[in-house]
Image: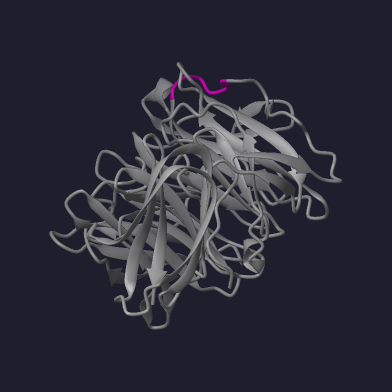
């Protein structure tokens, strides 16, 4: 496997597809009646965009709208929940069936509803109460819902699926209090759930390791137990997706020493590291397993991560308001040559929803023009690895390796330096664990995680 590479800062995108050169509004800008809280974005299998949100104009009740090709219209009535609906999430299946899950603010009861073409009908009687919730559908269209039952020390994570007219639950004990500890964007306290095509449920969640520190775990169900697929400290999960090859991709934010970077794991292996860039808030995959990540108004693309071909590019998106509510989704209905990227976000000032789109090719290629970058190869490693650093600005730099406690393992200074620097590292006598390669100048700082096994 190749090492964890960095993304580029400026790129030129080339393709044979008739791609758009600028983002276009889908329907009119600011199309919701007013403030739209807690938005989610879903593209159906036939290519129809849907959004769910709290509609502040009617008391923050649940609302779902779709784009009918001309304008945004409500699916069912506006405000179909009985009261304030928190943590809304949409899911659709290959038959274009549309589901929504949410938690009622009044009593934390969870409701799952399905749209029948006219109205939103309850899906059975869901008995669990939980502020934290999320929904996914398996390949046959069966809904799975993850909820959290709070405890003093370790919460219980409950995964329920609807079969035979009832919800059947299966649970595991979390490694801490779910969603506590800070370190991630608001809203990332909700656990994530995805079901592989072969029917295996995966759950990712953040939990409190220590006050002010969040860790994350990915669990998968191997009957009759939930087993840990991956875990990391100082991390918060943001998004989870399954590609057509049944690989599970989880994107998460790492926060350490006031630096933020994002990592993607496929199964239990870290395959991508963003470097010191704006915090990502969402991620999606297209049918060719290209990975699209959204962060602070930028759409980052990584090509064919399932094959370790980590060419990256950056597309400038609209201003995303800095509130971590933006969502990204890929229209997968055109499986031959092109796809369309959709972004839903609260518009600056009014906090009404706007959706923009950009048509592009499958397998976008890019010419990288990096400013500052660090690569580590191989990563993870047995203590023997190469570091390669590109620094565009002349500065006095300190290069150091720290352990997870912040203790210095290695340090080197480069005075009035710019350009390329590489070094072979021999840490085979160092204890296995997570380490951090830090390059600091007078202004810039870049951090990379290094995993020793």
- Which of 115 and 56 lies nearest the eye of the viewer? 56
Above or below — where is 264 with respect to 321? below
Above or below — where is 229 with respect to 287? below
Q: Which residues are magenta?
A: 30-35
Would you identify the image quadrant in which residue 186 lies? Answer: top left
Above or below — where is 291 with respect to 315? below
Whether 180 is among the magenta residues is no
Labels in figure, total: 0
- Quarter of the image with the N terminus is bottom right
Residue at (59%, 75%) from the top-left corner? 198
The image position of residue 271, as x and y in percent, is 54, 64
The image position of residue 225, as x and y in percent, is 36, 80
Main SS of the magenta part reads loop
- Which of 398 and 228 lies nearest the eye of the viewer? 398
The image position of residue 318, as x and y in percent, is 58, 27
- Quarter of the image with the C terminus is bottom left
Residue, far top: 349
Residue at (47%, 19%) from the top-left corner? 34
Residue at (16%, 51%) from the top-left corner? 211
Residue, far left: 152
Would you identify the image quadrant in which residue 83 lies? Answer: top left
Residue at (51%, 37%) from the top-left corner? 393
- Which of 21 and 40 lies nearest the eye of the viewer? 21
Horizontal placement of 268 versus 299: left or right? Answer: left
The image position of residue 184, as x and y in percent, is 34, 46
Residue 68 visible in the displayed image:
yes
């Amino acid at each position: 496997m190749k090492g964890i590479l960095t993304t580029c800062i400026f790129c030129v995108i080339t393709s044979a597809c008739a791609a758009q050169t600028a983002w276009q509004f889908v329907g009119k800008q600011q199309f919701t009646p007013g403030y739209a809280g807690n938005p989610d974005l879903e593209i159906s299998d036939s290519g129809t965009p849907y959004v769910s949100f709290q509609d502040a104009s009617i008391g923050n009740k649940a609302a779902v709208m779709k784009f009918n090709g001309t304008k945004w219209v409500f699916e069912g009535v506006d405000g179909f929940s009985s009261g304030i609906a928190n943590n809304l999430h949409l899911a659709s299946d290959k038959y274009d069936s549309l589901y929504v899950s949410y938690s009622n603010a009044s009593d934390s009861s969870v409701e799952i509803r399905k749209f029948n073409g006219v109205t939103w009908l309850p899906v059975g009687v869901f008995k669990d109460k939980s502020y934290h919730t999320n929904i996914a559908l398996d390949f046959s269209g069966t809904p799975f819902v993850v909820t959290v039952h709070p405890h003093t020390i370790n919460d219980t994570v409950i995964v329920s699926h609807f079969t035979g007219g009832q919800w059947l639950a299966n649970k595991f004990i979390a490694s801490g209090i779910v969603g506590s500890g800070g370190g991630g964007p608001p809203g990332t306290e909700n656990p994530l759930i995805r079901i592989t095509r072969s029917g295996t449920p995966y759950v990712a969640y953040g939990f409190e390791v220590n006050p002010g520190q969040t860790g994350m775990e990915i669990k998968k169900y191997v009957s009759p137990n939930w087993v840990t697929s991956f875990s990391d400290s100082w991390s918060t999960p943001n998004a989870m997706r399954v590609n057509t090859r049944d690989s599970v991709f989880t994107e998460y934010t790492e926060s350490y020493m006031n630096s933020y970077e994002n990592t993607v794991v496929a199964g239990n292996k870290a395959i991508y590291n963003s470097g010191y860039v704006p915090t990502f808030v969402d991620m999606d995959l297209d049918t060719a397993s290209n990975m699209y990540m959204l962060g602070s108004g930028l759409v980052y693309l990584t090509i064919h991560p399932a094959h370790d071909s980590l060419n990256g590019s950056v597309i400038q998106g609209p201003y995303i308001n800095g509130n971590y509510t933006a969502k990204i989704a890929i229209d997968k209905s055109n499986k031959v040559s092109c796809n369309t990227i959709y972004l839903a976000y609260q518009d600056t000032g009014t906090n009404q929803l706007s959706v923009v789109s950009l048509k592009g090719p499958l397998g976008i290629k890019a010419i990288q023009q990096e400013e500052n970058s660090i690569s580590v190869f191989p990563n993870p490693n047995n203590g023997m690895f190469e570091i390669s650093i590109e620094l565009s600005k002349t500065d006095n730099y300190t290069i150091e390796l720290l352990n997870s406690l912040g203790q210095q393992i290695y340090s080197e200074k480069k005075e009035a330096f710019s350009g390329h620097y590489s070094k072979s590292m021999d840490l085979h006598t160092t204890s296995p664990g997570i380490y951090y390669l830090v390059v600091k100048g007078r202004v810039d700082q870049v951090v990379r995680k290094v995993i020793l096994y």
